[in-house]
Image (cartoon, rainbow, N blue to C red):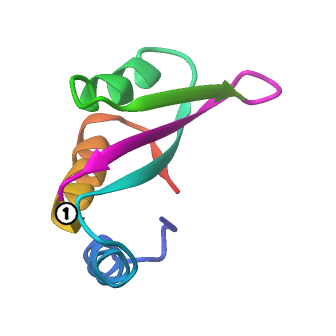
Amino acid sequence: MSDSTNPEEFYAKLKKQLQDTAMWPAEYLYKFIVPTKGEKVTQVEDIFDNMGAVINTKQSKKGTYTSVSINVRMKDPDHVIEKYKEVADKVEGVISL
């Protein structure tokens, strides 16, 4: 999500795209970039704990950032967006892709 985008506009647009492109429940792939140091990666992983999510992480070349890809079955577009908001609220410095 770019800094120039109003978060509510972003989520409204995302919800429409999700409604138009998938039959729910469906698999959804989240992608986040988080600072590697501290507990940021663990914080993101914990948000998706006990959901049957497949989580892959990969550090940047210099190790400053870690990309976190999470593939998980979600009930509907509202739940997809709730998780984006939860990550944004709980994980400082996260970038949602």
The residue at 42%/24% (across/down) is: 40
Q: Relative to residue 95, is residue 66 depicted above or below?
A: above
Is 70 positioned to the left or the right of 37 in the image? left
Q: Is residue 46 magenta?
A: no
The residue at 44%/49% (across/down) is: 30
The spot of residue 4 in percent (x, y) is: 48, 76
- Nearer to me, 69 or 35: 69
Q: Residues within 10 Å of mark 1 (few under 14, many from 20)?
A: some
The spot of residue 60 in percent (x, y) is: 74, 30
Is 88 positioned to the left or the right of 56 in the image? left
User: Which amino acid, by three-letter code, is at mark 1?
Assistant: Asp
The residue at 41%/16% (across/down) is: 39
The spot of residue 86 in percent (x, y) is: 22, 45
Q: Number of callouts in the render?
A: 1
Q: Quadrant of residue 61?
A: top right
Q: Relative to residue 17, is residue 73 depicted above or below?
A: above
Is 40 positioned to the left or the right of 43 in the image? right
- Per the image, the residue denoted by label 1 is 76
- Nearer to me, 91 or 45: 45
Is 49 positioned to the left or the right of 18 in the image? left
- Nearer to me, 73 or 5: 73
Q: Relative to residue 94, is residue 9 depicted above or below?
A: below
- Element type at marker 1? loop
Q: Quadrant of residue 20?
A: bottom left
The residue at 36%/73% (across/down) is: 22
Q: Which residues are magenta?
A: 60-75
The extreme right residue here reads 61
Report the predominant secondary structure element of the magenta stretch: strand
The spot of residue 27 in percent (x, y) is: 37, 52
Q: Is residue 67 magenta?
A: yes
